[in-house]
Image (cartoon, rainbow, N blue to C red):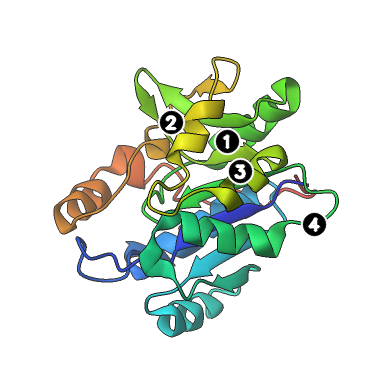
Amino acid sequence: MIPAIVLAAGRSSRMGRAKALLPLGGGETFLTRIVGTFLDAGVDDVVIVVGHERDEIVQTFAASGLPARFAVNADYDRGQLSSLLAGIAVVDRPGVSAVLMTLVDVPFVSAATVRAVVDHYRRTRAAVVRPTSGARHGHPLLIDRALFGELRAAEHDSGAKPIVRAHASAAGDLPIADEGAYLDIDTVEEYARAISDRSIAGADDARPARRPGSL
């Protein structure tokens, strides 16, 4: 089993409003788009980590009818590692071999990319699998369960990056051409550009039927 964790607990201070709630048209928000993408890719356990403005995010998401669970990170101001650990605490159980992780800032990744990351992990068993394009590294990031202990022991000030970098490898880096995997939206200007770029924003407008089965 490979569940997915969506980190949506931060203050979104550069955006000025919760990125999870930003609209994308067609009734979708950043958060519903991401969860829908994981479901389309065959992920049957999606956990959303919330903190800042959690009640509004949970209530708005509930109206979508999409199946997902929530984890509350009361210490969200400690950074992304605290949210990742809150998600891992919910998903980790016997039978889980790895976890997919993405930020709510990255709404345009495709279901095909999610499937490619998982398939690559199953072929290579690399400890870290990530989309790559030149020097860029994208989402979702896949982390093998063997690294959960290191993440739990990590310093929050340093975050997960040192562990990811230490275990990243040529075997785990997967060339992916999907621009949505690398588009991290942090500001109002980036948001406006992204939703006006139909080559990205419109790529998945016609949502495919959800595939049976799970990862």
Label 2 or label 3, whichever lies nearer to me, is: 3
Amino acid bearing label 2: Asp
Category of crowding for the residue at label 3, using alpha-carbon neighbours closer than 10 angstroms: few (below 14), some (14–19), many (at least 20): few
The residue at 33%/41% (across/down) is: 183
**At numbered mark 3, what does the secondary structure look like: helix, strand or loop?**
helix
Q: What's under tag 3, amino acid-wise?
A: Glu
Across and down, in percent, residue 138 comes to 43, 35
Q: Which residue is mark 1?
A: 112
Q: Position of residue 131 (x, y in %)?
A: 49, 29
Q: Earlier in the sequence, mark 1 or mark 3?
A: 1
How much space separates mark 1 and mark 4, taking CA atoms?
26 Å
Q: Which residue is mark 4?
A: 93
State the residue in front, 126 or 122: 126
Residue 26 visible in the displayed image: no
Asked if labels 4 and 1 touch by Cβ distance under 8 angstroms, the answer is no
Q: Which residue is mark 2?
A: 178
Note whether 50 is above or below 93 in the view shown. below
Residue positioned 26% across, 52% down in the render: 195
- Determine whether the residue tagged by mark 4 lies in a helix, strand or loop: loop
Density class for disc 2 (Cα within 10 Å; few <14, some 14-19, many ≥20) is some
Q: Are marks 4 and 3 in contact (CB under 8 Å)?
A: no
Q: State left or right for residue 24 relative to residue 3.
A: left
